[in-house]
Image (cartoon, rainbow, N blue to C red):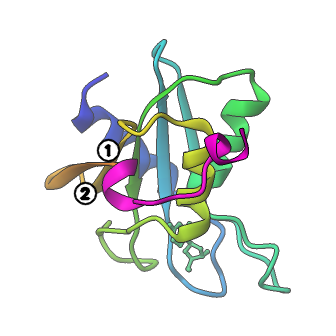
């Protein structure tokens, strides 16, 4: 799967967002090293704190399916009724990525027309990781 296709999958996943409180829709497409794809969207809640980001929905679905080796994630945001736009992953999602990914895990941000590839090492330096507990 190309980076463009991964971004396009994130844009599709974004359409499933349940975000009546923020009106901000996020989609994520997570690619495993063996080529499987897991999609996520943000799911909000009237009590606010149970809200889950698109990235974690994708990761937890993948983990539940036995996946442990991850290649890349594409993330797309944007207000309801507007075109997809750039969305940077929150700190909690960066911590979850750190739990399951190598430092060269790729994070694609932007839209399918215009995106940039980062690594988790770029976006989350000096992170606390499973190695810190060994
Ligand atoms: N959100 C995500 O899904 N991913 C992020 O990386 C940033 C924020 C969601 C959470 C909430 O539903 C909405 O965007 C506004 O914060």
Judge whether residue 1 is colored magenta: no
**Most distant residue in the right direction:** 47
Left or right of 44 on screen, residue 68: left
Residue 43 location, x and y as percent?
A: 70, 65
Q: Is residue 16 visible?
A: no
Which residue is denoted by mark 1 in the rendering? 7
* Picture residue at 37% right of the left edge, 68% below the top: 87
Q: Are marks 1 and 2 in contact (CB under 8 Å)?
A: yes
Return the x and y of residue 104 as percentages of the image width and height.
35, 36
Q: Which residue position is annotated with label 2?
A: 111
Q: Which one is nearer the viewer's eye here, 111 or 16?
A: 111
Q: Is residue 30 visible?
A: yes
Q: Does residue 84 appear left or right of residue 99 in this picture?
A: left
> SS for tag 1?
helix
Q: Quadrant of the N terminus?
A: top left
The CA distance from mark 1 to mark 2 is: 6 Å
* Region rendered in magenta: 120-134
The C terminus lies in quadrant? top right
């Amino acid at each position: 799967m190309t980076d463009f296709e991964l971004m396009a999958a994130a844009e599709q996943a974004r359409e499933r967002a349940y975000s009546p409180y923020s009106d901000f829709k996020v989609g994520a497409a997570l690619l495993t090293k063996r080529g499987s794809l897991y999609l996520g969207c943000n799911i909000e809640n009237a009590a606010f704190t149970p809200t889950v980001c698109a990235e974690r929905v994708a990761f937890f679905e993948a983990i539940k399916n036995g996946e442990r080796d991850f290649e890349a994630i594409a993330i797309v945001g944007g207000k309801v009724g507007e075109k997809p736009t750039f969305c940077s992953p929150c700190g909690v999602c960066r911590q979850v990525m750190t739990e399951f990914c190598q430092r060269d895990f790729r994070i694609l941000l932007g839209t399918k027309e215009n995106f940039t590839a980062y690594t988790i090492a770029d976006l989350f330096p000096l992170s606390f990781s499973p190695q810190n507990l060994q």
